[in-house]
Image (spheres, helix red, strand yellow):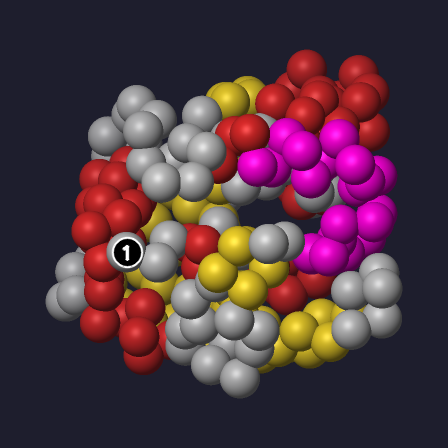
């Protein structure tokens, strides 16, 4: 089994946040799906695998007040806090593997994941993730996921990556979730290569 913390700490130690392949100045597709959910400003939001992304800062700018960022990499979280400065004190930070983290039940109004789930290759890990997410999400809560599309890359940052679409995620979720939106994006990495991503939002019934 991959030492996820060690792997991602090495990646962040070698590169600045703007140099990693998944970097975007702003997660426009995620923000669009979050805005479409029309959540109240006090909705509890968790960004899984948030690392050094700008999403937490952008959510604060949009008026959201209860934001949690979970990431397995201490290096990634340190970078995010450093970039946010004093605003970092307004965010809850959890350093843990999402599969192992003890998260509150029936708690979050929105669970966001851009490019964490697609690193879970084993069926048992995928099932464990979905169980963790569904248990932590409130009834009526929103699950937003993004990752490599069916025509996207088969690996990222030295690790194999599973490719998905809204239908494949929906099958993993089962009947307790309703599909809201699906969208696609061609992401241009800092090195200039292109990666095809899917994004999908679901509502817990």
Query: Is residue 120 found left or right of 60 in the rendered image?
Result: left
Give me the residue at 67% from left, 33% from top: 10
At mark 1, the secondary structure is loop
**Residue 179 place in picture, x, y as percent:** 33, 72
Give me the residue at 59% from left, 54% from top: 158
Q: Name the residue under label 1.
A: 122
Q: In this view, does 25 lie above or below 152?
A: above
Query: Is residue 172 found left or right of 21 in the rendered image?
Result: left
The quarter of the rendered structure image containing the C terminus is: bottom left
**Residue 5 place in picture, x, y as percent:** 52, 30
**Whether residue 150 is visible:** yes
Q: Is residue 34 above or below residue 60?
A: below
Query: Is residue 25 found left or right of 167 in the rendered image?
Result: right
**Residue 115 place in picture, x, y as percent:** 53, 55
Q: Is 177 included in the stretch rendered in magenta?
A: no
The quarter of the rendered structure image containing the N terminus is: top left
Tell me which corner region of the image, top left, top right, bottom left or bottom right, holds residue 178.
bottom left
> Which region is colored magenta?
7-27
Q: Is 21 included in the stretch rendered in magenta?
A: yes
Tell me which corner region of the image, top left, top right, bottom left or bottom right, holds residue 78.
top right
Give me the residue at 73% from left, 57% from top: 21
* Residue 100 vs residue 94, the one in the foreground: 100
């Amino acid at each position: 089994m991959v030492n996820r913390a060690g792997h991602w700490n090495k990646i962040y130690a070698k590169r600045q946040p703007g140099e990693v392949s998944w970097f975007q100045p702003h997660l426009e597709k995620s923000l669009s799906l979050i805005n479409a959910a029309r959540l109240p400003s006090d909705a509890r939001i968790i960004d899984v695998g948030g690392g050094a992304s700008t999403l937490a800062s952008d959510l604060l700018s949009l008026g959201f007040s209860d934001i949690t960022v979970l990431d397995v990499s201490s290096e990634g979280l340190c970078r995010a806090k450093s970039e946010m400065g004093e605003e970092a004190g307004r965010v809850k930070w959890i350093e843990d593997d999402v599969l192992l983290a003890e998260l509150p039940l029936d708690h979050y109004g929105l669970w966001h994941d851009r490019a964490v789930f697609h690193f879970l290759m084993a069926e048992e890990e995928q099932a464990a993730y979905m169980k963790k997410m569904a248990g932590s999400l409130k009834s009526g809560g929103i699950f937003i996921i993004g990752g490599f599309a069916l025509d996207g890359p088969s690996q990222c940052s030295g690790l194999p990556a599973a490719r998905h679409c809204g239908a494949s995620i929906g099958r993993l979720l089962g009947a307790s979730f309703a599909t809201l939106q699906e969208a696609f994006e061609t992401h241009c990495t800092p090195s200039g290569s292109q990666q095809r991503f899917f994004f999908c939002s679901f509502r817990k019934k």
